[in-house]
Image (spheres, rainbow, N blue to C red):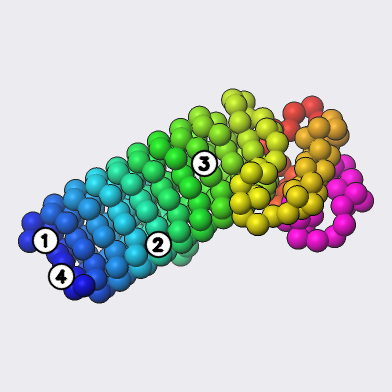
Amino acid sequence: MATMISPLAHVDPSAKIGENVTIHPFVCIDKDVEIGDGCEIMSFTCIIRGTRMGKNNKIYQGSKIGADPQDFRWKGEETYCYIGDDNVIRENVIINRGIKKEGGTRIGNHTFIMADTHIGHDSQISDKVVIGNGVKIAGSTQVGSCTILSSGVILHEKSRVGDWVLVKGGCRITGNVPPYVIMAHNPTSYFGVNAWILRRGGYSDEEINEIAKAYRHVYQTGTSVFNALRRIEADLEEGKIRKAITEFIRDCDLKIVAIPKNIE
């Protein structure tokens, strides 16, 4: 199938459009934009300068990809927004590009971003992430692979969410969420291990039990995070589960969400 561009769309002559791309009426493609093969851009969408889009993405009506960053530190420099392959971006999503030429906002592969979501500058969204309706992601955040942010979640600036996490609807995250867990409520609280999704992802019951054992030390013994890490390393055999949990927490300087202030 050849590339089809509606005569009612605006495509800047400098934009690089791949093969088998469909651009519907009333789309605006800015200068300095690259769109890979097999993409479909629905009506009333704007793809703004500095956007680098991979293959087989479908962008629904009214979305703004690569919008100017909403940050006073940005002074009009050329900055970037990178979209991977095989993503679905639903209606009225806004994704801001970065505030500096290096880095930029990055969306991975096989993500599903639902309507009315906003992703701020320099955020890093990994592969196979699901983002629910109306999620608000501030700048300079990180979301790990195979993670689900349910509808209405608010992720504050510089927060980090690990792999295989489920954050329940309406939850406000103001820090770092370690891998494999479910977080819920406001204030945020630990709701258990994300077992159902982990099983679907190929994790064994033994591995899920190891995860649960680790997080009992972190969230259910009343000890400090420092002591919880020592207990995890004494209680769990060395392996990918223990490494993923302990490395994440140490990389965050032991600062993770849902820990009571009096035992941090």
Alpha carbon distance from label 4 to label 3: 38 Å
| Mark whose residue sits in front, 4 or 3 | 3
- In the rendered image, is residue 134 in sight? yes
Residue 122 x/y as whole percent: 46, 54
Q: Quadrant of the N terminus?
A: bottom left
Q: Earlier in the sequence, mark 4 or mark 3?
A: 4
Q: Earlier in the sequence, mark 4 or mark 1?
A: 1
Residue at 24%, 45% in the rendered image = 62
Label 4: which secondary element:
loop
Number of marks in the rendered image: 4
Most extreme residue toward the left is: 7
Mark 4 crowdedness (10 Å alpha carbons): few <14, some 14-19, many ≥20? few
Residues marked 3 and 2 touching at CB (< 8 Å): no
Give the residue number, with chain letter if any, for mark 2. Answer: 86
Residue kind at label 1, given as amino acid type: Ser
Q: Earlier in the sequence, mark 2 or mark 4?
A: 4
Is 195 left, or right, of 263 in this rendering? left
Q: Is residue 87 above or below residue 37?
A: above
Give the residue number, with chain letter if any, for mark 1. Answer: 6
Q: Earlier in the sequence, mark 3 or mark 2?
A: 2
Q: Which residues are magenta?
A: 225-245
Q: Report the magenta stretch's main SS.
A: helix
Label 3: which secondary element:
strand
Label 2: which secondary element:
loop
Give the residue number, with chain letter if any, for mark 3. Answer: 149
Residue at 53%, 44% in the rendered image = 148
Residue 13: mark: 4
